[in-house]
Amino acid sequence: SRELFVLTYGALVAQLCKDYEKDEDVNTCLDRMGYGIGVRLIEDFLARSAVKKCRSYSETADTIAQVAFKMYLGVTPSVSCSSAAGNEFSLILDKNPLVDFVEELPAERASLCYCNLLCGVIRGALEMVHLAAEVTFLQDKLKGDAVTEIGIVFLKNTEDKKHKRN
Amino acid sequence: MADEALFLLLHSEMVAGLYRAAEQGDGENGRCISKLENMGFRVGQGLIERFTKDTARFKDELDIMKFICKDFWTTVFKKQIDNLRTNHQGIYVLQDNKFRLLTQMSAGKQYLEHAPKYLAFTCGLIRGGLSNLGIKSIVTAEVSTMPACK
């Protein structure tokens, strides 16, 4: 019953739009909620999927796209690396189940990131496995772009800081 | 199933998020519950439309209530309602002894005062579903011992 999730998400976004006038506030709220979900979802994910520890950022990005997205949303985004340093990746979604019932954004909500929850979820989940990252939407089909693209930038590993302290 | 975990987490984040916002803003408890209920209402309306597209017309109110207890509840919470009682005069009591949204919270009387928040969305869900089937209703919930609820 993914529909239940998608419909509930829609009702949530609608309610947030009523509560907050500014799009940025709604986006922040969605991101924060997503973060709260992500930090708990990672446990569920690791229990269900039993993936081994990822050895590189690229493996991590692949796991997110091919295992996690598939498990929870039923779609597999394609992954591409967008920096020479190997710490920036893009997940490209042709089909985004969260917007199944949404035709278009209303005119007064043009800068709403409808799926911002996803960014928060990824960020929260990564943090729980000690990977700090910035996750944002680079392209959004709802805003007229060709595809929906989520960008993940892996920041300096928090584990490095731990080693330095020792 | 993985979907269920996602929905449960989203639901508890929603409850937490709304209350967080209320604390910073006007601090009105009652409004949070009605916001949650209204969200449930919208979702219930949408869900029932999708479920009953292909099913036959319902014979009467009792039939509708049975549908809610069996098919609807199973699709949403992966189990059926444990007990349905009625006084045949328009009042129905649905009892779920292991309500999915409460099982993670506690198995007894602990946190009882927080239970209503988690039931508001589901009450709205039922009310929305019934309203799209043509029945106006008032849905309330009662929890005496978790994770059972009526």
Image (cartoon, coloured by chain):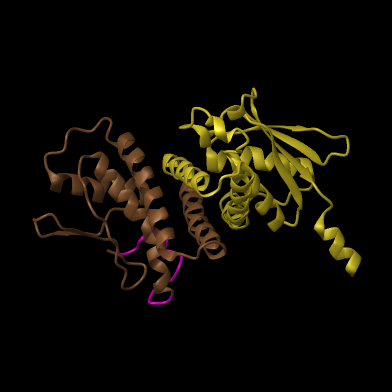
Q: Position of residue A13 (x, y in %)?
A: 51, 44
Q: Nearer the viewer, residue A150 or B6?
A: A150
Q: Nearer the viewer, residue B63 or B40?
A: B40
Kindly identify the residue that appears in the image at 64 percent across and 32 percent down: A77
Q: Position of residue A102 (x, y in %)?
A: 48, 31
**Would you say A144 lies left or right of B94 here?**
right
User: Magenta segment, which residues?
Assistant: B97-110
Split into 4 quadrants, where in the image is the C terminus of chain A? bottom right
Q: Position of residue A53 (x, y in %)?
A: 72, 52
Q: Nearer the viewer, residue A159 or B11?
A: B11
Chain coloured brown: B
**Would you say A163 lies left or right of A57 here?**
right
Residue furthest to the bottom: B109
**Would you say B138 lies left or right of A149 here?**
left
Kindly identify the residue that appears in the image at 13 percent across and 54 percent down: B90
Magenta stretch encompasses residue A35: no
Instruction: Evaluate whether residue B81 shows in this view.
Output: yes
Kindly identify the residue that appears in the image at 14 percent across and 46 percent down: B61
Kindly identify the residue that appears in the image at 76 percent across and 37 percent down: A89
Q: Position of residue B60 (x, y in %)?
A: 12, 42
Quadrant in the picture for residue A140: top right
> Chain A shown in which color?
yellow
Magenta stretch encompasses residue B102: yes
